[in-house]
């Protein structure tokens, strides 16, 4: 038995969202289309054709939504800016009406003592940049991103302290360029590594620019991290887990935090002819950019076994609409294992329960994740997402999501244990503040503290109803997590 440390006094208890998933108003006040507008408007790409045209209409419910955050006692709110709302074609004129929306949001948050945490990129690339340059496959998009960042840094340098560059680069490059179930729907691993490298350059460019323009602020990427477990103690499985850790985690984190690609994996990709082209100038740029903190999005880790003995992958009963697991970038059994990367096979853990959507529930893995990342990189950690997707039901005007309370309480407890272990942490943003569009899964997969009364067939009246978890989190914040 060990007495747990208290959460730090100024710990930022928060909640998160992303522009495309909540804002709606997809073509209002001069906003340009993003690749997600195009993708979700194309038949067959999302569950029941759901899209973010209206989403939960946060654009027109701003005061009400921030009012609910304030009433809850939220200390931080993580949101993303829609690039094509601010610069409709991605690189040209600034759309003042679009920028004004975020100015109003930040002002409202500050008036209510809620720390804004601004994400620059949560997947909604301006469509114009995709059309003109092939998006992240061109270095011209890095220049466009720098211009967009400059506008936001200039506008918010005095009011926003915490900034996130890219949300889950591992997920949007994997799903967008390898598995082809996110825009731009490419299925080519070589192009994935090439696009990913360009995003790395954009990340480093933005961080350096930020440090020039916003010396008092703090910036870092948000990474979708999962610890990797070997299925057994068989050294073959252990080796597979070392490979998977390189493949799933180090490939991104080493670049962010050490400014270089992991050596073994680079060697392997080069031998396969699928490594990105990295110039000497690129290397220098990556080395020069130092994040101030690391954002970690934690949902679950993954278990792997060797594929050297041609063991079969255990059948997986996930019912997620998306055809891959975004966190381990492994196909389901209906897709062939990639022949190019025979390093490991992903399997279900025999030890862990799963959510309704087949995501493993692993609070201990959260402590493992925080320990691993802090041990390796020694950067303060900001948990920028963690939460449970479930098909919540509104019964007699109430949502009793006690399963979500249990999920979050279990994770908050292991986070407290990690802090007691010595991990330096800035805050914790639960995913999500309110229900929102779950990209490919429509509106039935809910994550919020606040229920939004809409479904996959239409927006209905979009009434906001705090769930039981809202009141639980309100109390937890008031006690600074003393009772977990
Ligand atoms: C993360 C994203 O991958 O997980 C969020 O940053 C997303 O935007 C969340 O909503 C949950 O994923 P999903 O597919 O269940 O909505």
Image: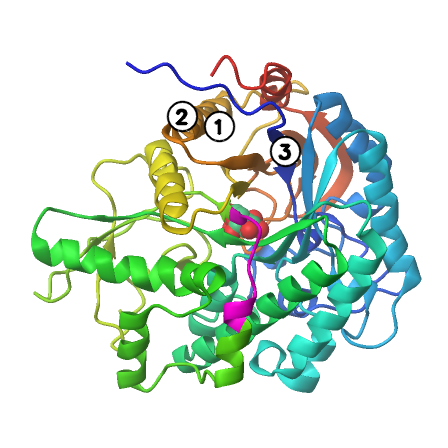
Can residue 191 be seen in this snapshot?
Answer: yes
- Circle 1 or circle 2, nearest the eye: 2
Q: Nearest the camera: 427 or 212?
A: 212
Q: Residue at x 65, y 76 (%)?
A: 142
Element carrying mark 2: helix
Q: Badge 3: how crowded within 10 Å, few (<14), some, or many (20+)?
A: many
Question: Which callout, 1 or 2, points at the residue further toward the start of the chain?
Answer: 1
Pointer 2 with pointer 3, Cβ within 8 A: no
Pointer 1 with pointer 2, Cβ within 8 A: no
Whole-percent x, y for residue 430 in the image: 57, 35
Q: Residue at x 37, y 35 (%)?
A: 367
Q: Badge 1: how crowded within 10 Å, few (<14), some, or many (20+)?
A: many
- For the residues labelled 2 and 3, the Cα–Cα distance comes to 20 Å
The residue labelled by disc 3 is 14
Whole-percent x, y for residue 356 in the image: 42, 38
The residue labelled by disc 2 is 420
First to last magenta residue range: 286-295
Label total for image: 3
Can residue 43 be seen in this snapshot?
Answer: no
Q: Residue at x 28, y 36 (%)?
A: 352
Answer with left or right where residue 386 lies relative to residue 105: left
The residue labelled by disc 1 is 408
Answer with left or right where residue 71 lies relative to residue 329: right
Work out which quarter of the rendered image holds the N terminus and state it.
top left
Whole-percent x, y for residue 6 in the image: 49, 19
Question: Which callout, 2 or 3, points at the residue further toward the start of the chain?
Answer: 3
Q: Nearest the camera: 452 or 267?
A: 267
Classify 113 as above or below 188. Answer: above
- Circle 3 or circle 1, nearest the eye: 3
């Amino acid at each position: 038995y060990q007495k747990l440390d208290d959460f730090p006094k100024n710990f930022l208890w928060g909640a998160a969202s992303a522009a495309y998933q909540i804002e709606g108003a997809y073509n209002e006040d001069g906003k340009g289309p993003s690749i997600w507008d195009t993708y979700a408007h194309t038949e067959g790409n999302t569950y029941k054709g759901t899209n973010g045209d209206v989403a939960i209409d946060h654009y027109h419910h701003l005061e009400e939504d921030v009012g609910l955050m304030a009433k809850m006692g939220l200390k931080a709110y993580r949101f993303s800016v829609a690039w094509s709302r601010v610069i409709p074609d991605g690189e040209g004129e600034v759309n003042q009406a679009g920028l004004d929306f975020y100015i109003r949001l930040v002002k409202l948050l500050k008036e209510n003592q809620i720390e804004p945490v601004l994400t620059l990129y949560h997947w909604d690339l301006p469509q114009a940049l995709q059309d003109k340059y092939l998006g992240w496959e061109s270095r011209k998009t890095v220049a466009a991103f720098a211009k967009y960042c400059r506008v936001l840094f200039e506008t918010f340098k005095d009011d926003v302290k915490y900034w996130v560059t890219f949300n889950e680069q591992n997920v949007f490059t994997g799903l967008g360029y390898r598995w082809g179930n996110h825009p731009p729907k490419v299925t080519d691993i070589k192009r994935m590594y090439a696009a990913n490298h360009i995003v790395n350059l954009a990340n480093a460019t933005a961080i350096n620019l930020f440090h020039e323009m916003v010396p008092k602020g703090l910036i870092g990427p948000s990474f979708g991290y999962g610890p990797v477990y070997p299925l057994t103690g068989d050294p073959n499985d252990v080796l597979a887990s070392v490979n998977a850790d390189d493949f799933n985690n180090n490939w991104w984190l080493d670049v962010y935090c050490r400014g270089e690609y992991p050596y073994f994996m680079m060697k392997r990709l080069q031998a396969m002819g699928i490594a990105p082209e990295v110039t000497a100038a690129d290397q220098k740029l990556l080395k020069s950019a130092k994040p101030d903190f690391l954002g970690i999005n934690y949902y679950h880790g993954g278990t792997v076994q060797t594929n050297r003995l041609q063991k079969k992958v255990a059948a997986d009963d996930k019912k997620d609409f998306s055809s891959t697991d975004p966190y381990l970038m492994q196909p389901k059994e209906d897709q062939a294992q990639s022949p190019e990367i025979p390093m490991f096979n992903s399997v279900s853990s025999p030890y862990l329960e799963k959510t309704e959507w087949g995501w493993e529930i692993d609070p201990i893995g959260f402590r493992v994740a925080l320990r691993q990342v802090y041990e390796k990189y020694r950067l303060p950690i900001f948990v920028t997402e963690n939460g449970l997707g479930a098909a919540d039901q509104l019964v007699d005007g109430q949502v009793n999501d006690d399963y979500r309370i249990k999920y979050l309480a279990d994770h908050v407890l292991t986070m407290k244990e990690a802090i007691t272990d010595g991990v330096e942490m800035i805050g914790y943003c639960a995913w999500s503040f309110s229900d929102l569009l779950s990209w490919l899964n429509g509106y039935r997969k809910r994550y919020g503290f606040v229920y939004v009364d809409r479904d996959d067939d239409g927006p209905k009246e979009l009434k906001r109803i705090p769930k039981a978890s809202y009141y639980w989190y309100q109390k937890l914040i008031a006690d600074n997590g003393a009772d977990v």
